[in-house]
Amino acid sequence: MNKIVKNASEAIIGIKDGMTLMFGGFGLCGIPENVIRELAKIKVKNLTCISNNAGVDDFGLGILLRDKQIKKMIASYVGENKEFERQFLSGELEVDLVPQGTLAERIRAGGAGIPAFYVPAGYGTEVGEGKEAREFNGKMHLLEYGLTADFAIVKAKYGDAMGNLIYNNTANNYNNMMAMAGKITIAEVEEIVPVGELNPNQIHTPGIFVQRIFQGVDYEKRIEFETTM
């Protein structure tokens, strides 16, 4: 049951060109920094990435965008990344913009084995173009499909050798649901603790959903957008 691997390099074994990857995080909070840096090193390309956003120009998924490693982004927000904007407007990057709640539910549904569901968000807008629509209780809904990935890559505060994870406050965000939706889930954590030390009542992701875990290093923990008075 020991799922610990040595480092990010060992954790990403098997990730190949053209795969679909999920990356936990919201803005720059709770992102798997070590794995992103390692993917940039090995130059894997033509990736479809599912994430709340694409980081900023020189950090987070922005690193993979800069090096043209991402073919398609499925995301809900693109506001802080100028390279994302440039590639999208020039046609270099395929983008599927999804309402934030819908994106979260599509990931959760994929992890729960639910193939599709109906949601009212986006009906009557560009989001609904080409999608099946049905009326429920007098309100129109769009058919949306669950999302899964070849690899789900998450970041937690604490983990143990069995893969049990605890996220740090808002760093929970997309990480918890993504951990359920990958064929293989990689967890990078700030601290690995002995099995049994984590309070079972506080565990966010049970180890059954995690295949590989390692302790990361050199976290920058940047602020995505700073406002001062």
Image: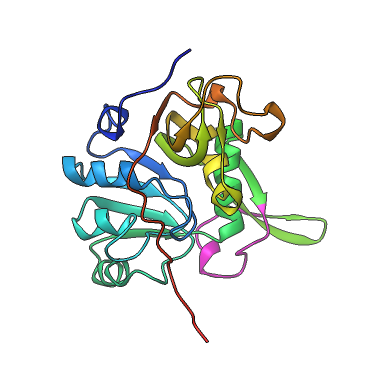
* Rendered view: 159 above or below 157: above
**Place of residue 93 in the rendered image (x, y in percent of width and height, measured from the top left):** 28, 60
* Secondary structure character of the magenta stretch overall: loop
Relative image position of residue 84 (x, y in whole percent): 31, 66
Q: Tell me if 198 is positioned left or right of 87 in this view.
A: right
Q: Is residue 72 magenta?
A: no
Which region is colored magenta?
Answer: 119-133
- Residue at point 31% right, 25% down? 6
Q: Extreme right residue here? A: 137
Residue located 37% across and 60% down the image:
55
Residue closer to the observer: 44 or 39: 39
- Tally of numbered discs: 0
Q: Is residue 104 visible?
A: yes
197 shown above or below 32 = above
Quadrant of the rendered structure where residue 128 is?
bottom right
**Above or below, 106 relative to 87:** above
Q: Nearer the viewer, residue 109 or 184?
A: 184
The location of residue 210, given as percent across then percent down, is: 48, 26
Locate residue 223, reporting x and y percent: 43, 66
